[in-house]
Amino acid sequence: MANMIVASSNAKPLTPPTTTFQQHSPKPRLQIPQLSFPNKITQKLSSVATAATTLKSLSLLAVSSLTFAPPSLAAEIEKAALFDFDLTLPIIAAEFLLLMFALDKVYFSPLGNFMDQRDAEIKEKLNSVKDTSSEVKQLEDQAAAIMRAARAEISAALTQMKKETQVEVEKILAEGRKKVEAELQEALADVEKQKEATIKALDSQIAALSQDIVKKVLPVK
Amino acid sequence: MNVISCSSNTLKVLYDISGVEVGQHFYWQIGGLQVHAQVLITSWVVIAILLGSALIAVRNPQTIPTAGQNFFEYVLEFIRDVSKTQIGEEYGPWVPFIGTMFLFIFVSNWSGALLPWKIIQLPHGELAAPTNDINTTVALALLTSVAYFYAGLSKKGLGYFSKYIQPTPILLPINILEDFTKPLSLSFRLFGNILADELVVVVLVSLVPLVVPIPVMFLGLFTSGIQALIFATLAAAYIGESMEGHH
C-alpha cells in the first residue's frame, strides 16, 4: 500500500500544474528525495550518492522551514480550497438519505424483524421446554408409583409362595416322619418277636443242657 | 533572508514531492454549479459496498446464521445498543438513521485508509475518503441537526422550544448557540481527524517509504473507527436529548 501511495505521489509532478500553488512554485532545486523511491523511472539520476545523507538534512530543513515559513507561502496554501462549499453538500445529503432508506429496506428492517422473531421463537420454545419438564416430572412420579406398587405386589406374592411351599414341605416332612416311625415301630416289633422266640428256644435248650450237666455232675448211682 | 528563501523553497519541494494535495478538487459542472467529483465517486463506491454486502449477507436470513449474516447481525445489535443507550426505549425508529450514519462514516473512513484509491489518476485532485471533504461532514452534521429538531418537534410539538429557557431564561443565548455549535463541532471533528490522518500517512510515506508509516496507518484505522462511533453516538445523544421529557 505504501508503494502505491508513493507511486501515485511520484506521478503527480507529471500531471499538468493546474493549481495556483503549483504554478507559483519554481523548479525544484532538491530532487534527491525522489530517488529514494523504488519504482521511480523517469527521474534524473543526478545525485544518487548523496541520497542517504540528504534524507537527514531534508528532515532538518523541513523542521527549520516550518519555523521560518514566510507568510506569503501560508497565503498560497490557503488559496487551495479546503473549505470549498458547493453543490457537493446537498448531493451528499441526498445520497445519505437515499442510502438510509435503501439500507433500511435491505438491512435494518428485514434483519431486525427476523432477529426479533427468532428471539420470540426461542423464548417460546424455552418456555415450552420448561412445561415439558414439569410433565416429565409427573411422568417420573407415575413411573415411581407404578414401580412401588409392582414391587409390593411381587413381595406379597413371594411371601405367599414361601408360606405355601413351607406348608407343603412340612406336610411332606411329617408324612415322611410318620412313615419312618411306622417302619421303625414295625421293625422294633419284629425284633421283639425274634427276641422272644430266641429266648423260648434258648429256654428249651437251657433245660436240656441243665439236665445234661446234672447227669454229668451227679453220676447215676 | 537567505535562510528563509531557502527554507521556503524546500517546503515547496517537499509539498510537491509528497503529493499532499490539500483542498484540491476534481470539479464537475452541474448546471453552472460545481461539485467535487472525487467525493461523489468515492461516496458512490462506499454506498455500493454497503448496499452490496448487506444485500448479499441478508438476502435470505437463516435461523442459524451463516458467517456473513452473523457479522451483520452483530453490527445491527451494536447499532441498536448504541441507539438504545443514547435515545432510550423509543430508539426503534432511529436505528436506520444512526446505523446509516455509523456505517457510512465508518466505511468511508476505512476506504480512505484501506482502498488503493490513488492508483486511479484523476486529472486534478485525488480520490480519498469522502469524509475528508468538508462538504460531506457538514452535510452529515446538518442532517443530524435536522434529525434532532424533527425528533423533538414530533415528540413534543411546539413545546420543544421551551427547552431554550429551561433551567432559566438567562441561558437562552447559550441554548440557541448550542444549536450552531453542535453541527459545527460534529463536522469539524470528523473532517479534521480524517484529513489529518491521511495527511500524516502521506507525508510520512513521502519521507520514509518503508515500515515507519505502518504504525501510523494502524493508528489511522483506529481513529477512523473511533470517529465513526463518536459521530453516531453524539447524533443519537442529541436526538435522545431533544426527545427526553422535562421534569
Image (cartoon, coloured by chain):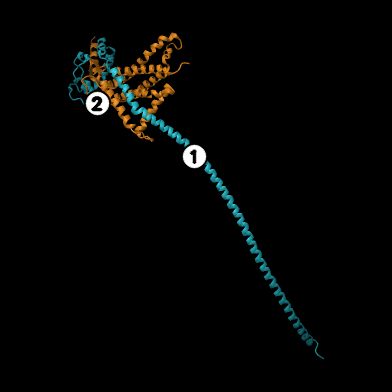
Please tell me which residue lies in front, A59 or B56. B56
Tell me which amino acid carries mark 2.
Answer: Met
Q: Secondary structure at mark 2?
A: helix
B56 w.r.t. A20: above or below? below
| Mark 1 or mark 2: whose residue is earlier in sequence | 2
Instruction: In the picture, one chain is orange; tell me its letter.
Output: B
Please tell me which residue lies in front, A27 or A207. A207
Residue furthest bottom in the image: A221
Chain letter for mark 1: A
Give residue B201's position: percent from left, percent from top: 29, 22
Q: Residue under circle 1? A: A132
Q: Is residue B142 visible?
A: yes
Q: Which image quarter: residue A42?
A: top left
The 10 Å Cα crowd at callout 2, few under 14, some 14 to 19, many 20 or more, is some
Q: Residue under circle 2? A: A4
The 10 Å Cα crowd at callout 1, few under 14, some 14 to 19, many 20 or more, is few
Front: mark 1 or 2:
1
Query: In the drawing, does residue A167 fall left or right of residue A133?
Result: right
Both marks 1 and 2 on one chain: yes
Please tell me which residue lies in front, B9 or B27. B27
Tell me which amino acid carries mark 1.
Answer: Thr
Q: Secondary structure at mark 1?
A: helix
Give residue A35's position: percent from left, percent from top: 21, 23
Tell whether label 2 touches label 1 (CB within 8 Å): no
A153 w.r.t. B140: above or below? below
Residue at horizontal 66%, vertical 64%? A174
Chain letter for mark 2: A
For the N terminus of chain B, the image quarter is top left
Q: Is residue B220 visible?
A: no
Instruction: In the picture, one chain is cyan; tell me its letter.
Output: A
